[in-house]
Amino acid sequence: MISRTTQSLLAAVGVLAIAVGIAEVHPPTGQAAAPGRTVRTAVQHTSLVCPTPLQGTGSTVYTLAAPGVSSGAGTAAAASSGTAVLGALPATAPAPAASASASASKGPAGSAAGPAALAKLTKVGGGTTAKAAAGNKAAALLATADGSVAPGFTVQQTTTGPNKALSGTACGAPGTDFWFTGADALKSSVDYLELTNAESTVADVDVQIFGTDGEVDNAQAANISVPADGTSSLLLSTLLSPGAGSSYLSVHVLVRSGRVGAALHADSGGSSGADWLPATALGDSQIVPGLPGDLTDASLVLTVPGSADADLKVQLASQDGWITPAGHETVHAKSGMTTVVDLGALTHGQPAAMRLTPSDPTQPAPFSAGIRVVRGKSKTGQDVGYLAGSTPIGQRATAAGNTNGDSSLLLTSTGAAAVVKVSEIGADGTPTSQNVSIQAGATVSTVLKGPSGSYAVTVEPVSGGPVYAARMIGRTSGGVPNFTIQQLPDDRSTVQIPRALQDESILTP
């Protein structure tokens, strides 16, 4: 008979096997077993959600990239076959009627088995593309990858708007907690929050909104039901009380049950551009990479949801190292509300990253940070992009959707001097690599040449301190510097799992 203690242990092992089912459960070939330690191995399944492209008459393109196993990971995934698929969410019922302010959909109506895939990828490479449906008919999409193409699988969604403005985002993994800092709900704005549920049960979501006067209290933002295999599109202004419109907001998406893909698209409704806001998280300190050298205006947006104010020291990682921006040495952000600081053209021709740390390390206060970036001049035309507190590249970062001559990397070393390997990967999967050196506390901008057609770029650490990265796509049209920036965290190509030992003695009563 097996004792109750042994039964509990076996149950725990079973739960662990389910929890790490996304990766190889045994160590990679040739890697020594180490009792009581974890091993890093390549993931075997990746799921990403691409939000509904709310662009009216815009044209949206999706680009799939599978860079393969990153250095230091196991080889099991590389030896197996794999397939990545981009397609609509499973559709089991006709889509419900949509209102003017919010809509919920369950994929294309009347398609019991789901539509055919928009794109497939069966080998490592970075150039498979697909187009979304025209106009407002485009739906949210689900991208999945298994086997050899799962490690680092990335999908870029890029939209060219009616005025040639660019909106771009990397399709994200479903989660339960998201912060979007820098949105607005003025009458002229058309900001939409997209909540996509790729699971088979309804997800329950609460949305908190923090403005410059504090948290907005509105019952419409609570208990939002996102249908299984469907999307809820919420016009941000409808989640606010009449007259509560604000030029700067933070939106906190908290999932009470299930998981969702969350995305927020900001559109001024005029000629100053549009783009997706990157999701971020709370932190006592924040690094915001990706500030272009030629920006003409920038606004720092901070939200402190707790009960204590945040007094922060502001620093920029310039081309020559850390500097303190004149006139913006510190910032005071009040608790429970959103604070906005007009930074102007603070980069003065040099690419940069911003570091925000507590002025008094003994009194930290968690906060979210976003920066609204403007390029171009009001007389000739402008475009807008959004940045947020981000994380280092980790084992490797990947960006898809680059084309010849339109992309550049902004790389920042926040500690010691660093060297990274930048690889450009075309559709055939063959990388072209170069090493890029970054001084301590400095930011460098590297223009990507790339192979013909669409390609992916990866950034891997070689030596030195932590590196933060962002990729900017820029396409000038009619003298307007249209652009979109995506920050590049770790691409989740590997995972650490506990090292399990075979010990049959635990089965002895």
Image (cartoon, rainbow, N blue to C red):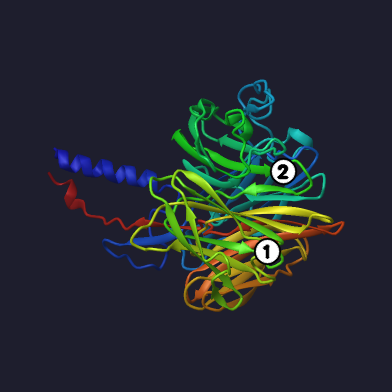
Q: Nearer the viewer, mark 2 or mark 1?
A: 1
Q: Nearer the viewer, residue 146 or 216?
A: 216
Tally of numbered discs: 2
Horizontally, is 409 left or right of 501 in the view?
right
- State which tag comes first along the sequence, 2 or 1: 2
Q: Nearer the viewer, residue 333 or 152?
A: 333
Horizontally, is 503 left or right of 408 in the view?
left
The Cα–Cα distance between marks 2 and 1, rounded to whole angstroms, is 20 Å
Residue 307 position, x and y percent, is 38, 45
* Circle 1 crowding by C-alpha within 10 Å: few under 14, some 14–19, many from 20: some
Horizontally, is 46 left or right of 112 in the view?
left
Q: Quadrant of the C terminus?
A: top left
Q: Say what amino acid the circle numbered 2 marks.
A: Ser
Q: Which image quarter: residue 470?
A: bottom right
Q: Can residue 13 be spotted in the picture?
A: yes
Horizontally, is 11 left or right of 146 in the view?
left
Q: Secondary structure at mark 2?
A: loop
Q: Nearer the viewer, residue 413 or 327?
A: 327
Residue 318 position, x and y percent, is 59, 73
Q: Which residue is mark 2?
A: 268
